[in-house]
Image (cartoon, helix red, strand yellow):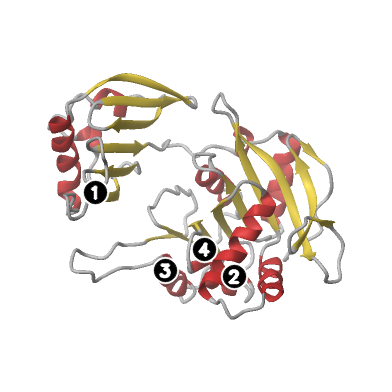
């Protein structure tokens, strides 16, 4: 890993944007236009030649030993400052090389940036009651940032193990183990998946697991962990609503164990996940907690809650900036 802005070699004029604390993301499209995101708004700030951009990408990737060429046209990498890089070149990038660098603040963002006092207090209560929480939202809705804020409310003496595709979480606890997946080598060996990391983490005596985005067969291993005593864990998933997040988790399980009856999968999810925190993003870039729901039970099974037209029953706890009900579930 390299400290991008500490390097003396030229970076094609991108240095000023990578040093700017108000810039959250730097994007180069087709090896020409340079865009940045500030406060949720995109701005075109300049241009760069495709050949220069390729040199910049090669310079950044050289210390991490990653290949980027026509046979391996995509790459993800984590930089020393915690920034996340994604680069794509032809033939996958039709109009020329593309680069995206997502920067992260050195200081964790507090819950107050996502919710008002009442909803923030509710989220803290759920964490303190050792509820298993699923954070959902669309791309760039702030899921990882909120996950970091929620994990920051965990008791300071807890042993936390974080598991991510690209290590982005920055926890201030003294007892933190950070695990990161690894792609296979060009020869197709050495891959370490999130499912593998979950199995490993369970042998490391975690008090709580903090898992980055769930998108594959690791969903099965996560639910097994949550249903066998690893209370108070946190994870994220891409979804358009809290209910969609539960259904998304169920569908990921079914992709791995297709012989399970759907009601059994729904029940497995409902027993593992206590509440879902869903994020939304306004046109001006503001990210906020749009809803918090408690998983009451599975539709058709005893319990109370609101029917959703899916296999789950939920109880709304918060809607936008207002708390509408007290939490009932807890594991302490």
Query: First in sequence: mark 2 or mark 1?
Result: 1
> Dot 2, crowdedness within 10 Å: few (<14), some or many (≥20)?
some
Residue at x 41%, y 38% (from the top left corner): 104
Q: In the image, which disc is placed on residue 159? A: 4
Q: Secondary structure at mark 1?
A: loop
Other residues around mark 4 within 10 Å, as few (<14) / some (14–19) / many (≥20): some
Residue located beneath label 1 in the image: 1
**In whole angstroms, how far apart are the C-alphas of marks 1 and 4?**
26 Å
Tag 3 and tag 4, C-beta contact below 8 Å: no
Residue 43 appears in view: yes
Residue 64 in percent (x, y) is at: 20, 52
Q: Secondary structure at mark 2?
A: helix
Q: Position of residue 205 (x, y in %)?
A: 50, 73
The answer to whether marks 3 and 2 mark residues whose Cβ atoms lie closer than 8 Å is no
- Gap between marks 2 and 4 measured at Cα: 20 Å
Q: Report which residue position mark 3 lands on.
A: 197
Residue 112: horizontal and vertical position, in percent? 63, 34
Q: Left or right: where does residue 181 sit relative to residue 218?
A: left
Gap between marks 2 and 1 measured at Cα: 33 Å
In this rendering, the answer to whether 282 lies above or below 324 is: above
Q: In the image, is residue 44 above or below residue 269? A: above
Residue at 82 percent across and 58 percent down: it is 328
Q: Answer with mark 2 or mark 4, whichever residue precedes in sequence.
A: 4
Does residue 290 sit above or below 188 in this rendering?
above
Residue under circle 2? 223
Measured Cα–Cα span from mark 1 to mark 3: 21 Å
N-term mark: 3 or 2: 3
Q: Is residue 8 visible?
A: no
Instruction: State the residue at coordinates (26%, 46%).
Output: 92
């Amino acid at each position: 890993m390299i400290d991008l802005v500490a390097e003396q070699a030229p970076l094609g004029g991108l240095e000023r944007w990578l040093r700017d604390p108000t810039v959250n993301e730097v994007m180069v499209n087709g090896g020409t236009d340079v865009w940045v995101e500030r406060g949720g708004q995109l701005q075109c700030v300049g241009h760069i030649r495709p050949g220069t951009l390729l040199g910049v990408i090669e310079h950044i990737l050289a210390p991490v030993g990653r290949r980027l060429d026509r046979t391996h046209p995509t790459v993800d990498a984590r930089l020393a400052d915690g920034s996340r890089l994604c680069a794509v070149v032809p033939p996958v990038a039709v109009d020329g090389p593309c680069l995206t660098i997502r920067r992260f603040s050195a200081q964790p963002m507090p819950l107050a940036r996502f919710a008002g006092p009442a909803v923030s207090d509710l989220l803290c209560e759920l964490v303190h009651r050792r509820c298993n929480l699923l954070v959902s939202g669309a791309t760039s809705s702030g899921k990882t940032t909120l996950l970091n804020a929620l994990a920051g409310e965990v008791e300071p003496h807890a042993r936390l193990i974080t598991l991510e595709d690209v290590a982005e979480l920055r926890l201030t606890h003294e007892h933190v183990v950070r695990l990161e997946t690894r792609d296979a080598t060009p020869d197709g060996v050495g891959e370490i998946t999130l499912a593998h990391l979950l199995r490993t983490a369970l042998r490391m005596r975690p008090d709580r697991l903090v898992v980055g985005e769930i998108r594959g067969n690791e969903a099965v291993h996560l639910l097994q962990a949550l249903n066998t005593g690893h209370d108070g864990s946190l994870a994220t998933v891409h979804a358009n609503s809290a209910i969609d997040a539960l259904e998304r988790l169920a569908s990921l399980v079914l992709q791995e164990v297709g012989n399970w009856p759907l009601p059994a999968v729904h029940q497995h999810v409902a027993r593992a996940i206590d509440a879902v925190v869903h994020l939304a993003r306004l046109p001006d870039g503001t990210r906020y907690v749009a809803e918090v729901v408690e998983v009451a039970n599975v539709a058709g099974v005893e319990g109370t809650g609101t029917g959703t037209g899916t296999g789950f029953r939920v109880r709304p706890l918060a809607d936008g900036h207002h708390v509408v009900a007290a939490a009932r579930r807890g594991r302490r």
